[in-house]
Amino acid sequence: MEVVPGIYRIQSDIGPRIMCQYYFDGPDRRLLVDTGIGPTPEDVIAPYLEGVGSSIEAVDDVIVSHADLDHCGGDRQLRKLNPRARLWCHELDRPWIESNTAMVNENYGWHAVFGFPRPDDEERASMLEDLGGDCPVDFGLRGGETMGLGPEWRVEVMHLPGHSLGHLGIWDPRSGAAIILDAVLERGIYSRAGELLIPPRYYDATAYQNTIRRLISLKPSVLLTAHYDVMEGDKAIEWLEKGLAYTYELHETVREALRSGTTDLWELTQHADKKLGPYPDFMTELGASVRSHVNMPGMPVR
């Protein structure tokens, strides 16, 4: 749907949850944010754009919000469909976005050395299929750049770190819309039926909290994410505040466990899952968030 004039939300399914990309239809420049998983550009994005009177060949620029398979997995397929489109991402996430092997090993497999369950061969093969093959990025971003889409329409690229170190979002001052994808994940990602599935993962707790505070201070009129419904006004602020409150709960959960003598990261993560979840899917992703709280100042000596 066209959520605000000129900004379209492209929604499809990824397993039991929703997945969204965003299309900016400017008079001078057309921008796509994220490419989904491997087949998304051909199966979802291209038909959608044709349905609103555009086309995937009309896309001038693609901004990849961050390094996760459901946000950059379609990069290679999109490039095949539209070789002239320029691909952008934050420099900090570029190594994982460009290399499927690096993504699987370092983003999804880092915790194996801490005693977490390792992805088996079938899981790795599924990840690589969703990642769609290696694809180079044309330009690196740092946040703070602006992009003109027309004579009276300019959007800002926001650096929203935490979930990943190089997570990007888009601020549209014309409409007051903040496109934040996975920069905030409330208490986790839910199924279409409302079941809590996946924990909020963040690699840097302080950065993640500051990202939420920044977004609250913007007071967006519309908040647009990758896996949640469209939120407006007070509901958007309440949702962001709920995400911030979750980080305080996790911090206290980790603090209490450390004080009780639990220091093993896998044990800490299982404890957090029982207290704040349970998270039936990708529970191991919680380990990154737990580790980021363990490393925050003021935690008990381990």
Image (cartoon, rainbow, N blue to C red):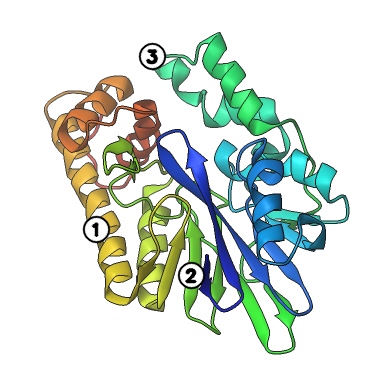
140 over 7 or under it: above or below: above
- CB within 8 Å, label 2 to label 3: no
Q: CA distance from mark 1 to mark 3?
A: 31 Å
Residue 11 position within the rendered picture, expressed as x and y whole percent measured from the top left: 52, 52
Relative depth, front residue between 154 and 2? 2
Q: Secondary structure at mark 1?
A: helix
- Residue 178 numbered mark, or none: 2
Disc 1: CA contacts within 10 A as few (<14), some (14-19) or many (>=20): some
- Whether tag 2 and tag 1 are in contact, CB under 8 A, the answer is no
Q: Is residue 292 left or right of residue 103?
A: left
Quarter assignment of residue 5: bottom right
Residue 198 against residue 147 in the figure, above or below? above
Q: Residue 242 got which mark?
A: 1
The answer to which of marks 1 and 3 sits earlier in the sequence is 3
Tell me the crowding category of disc 3: few under 14, some 14 to 19, or many 20 or more residues within 10 angstroms, Cα based.
few
**Residue kind at label 1, given as amino acid type:** Lys
As measured in the structure, the alpha-carbon distance from the residue carrying label 2 to the one carrying label 3 is 38 Å
SS assignment at label 3:
loop
Q: CA distance from mark 2 to mark 1?
A: 17 Å
Relative horizontal placement of residue 72, taking residue 136 as reference (left or right): left
Q: Position of residue 270 (x, y in %)?
A: 25, 24
Q: Nearer the viewer, mark 2 or mark 3?
A: 2
Q: Is residue 158 visible?
A: no
Q: Are marks 1 and 3 in contact (CB under 8 Å)?
A: no
Query: Can see residue 172?
Result: yes
Q: Nearer the viewer, mark 1 or mark 3?
A: 1
* Label placed on residue 115: 3
Seen as rendered, the residue at the extreme right is 84
When asked about the image quadrant of residue 100, the answer is top right
Q: Position of residue 218 (x, y in %)?
A: 41, 77
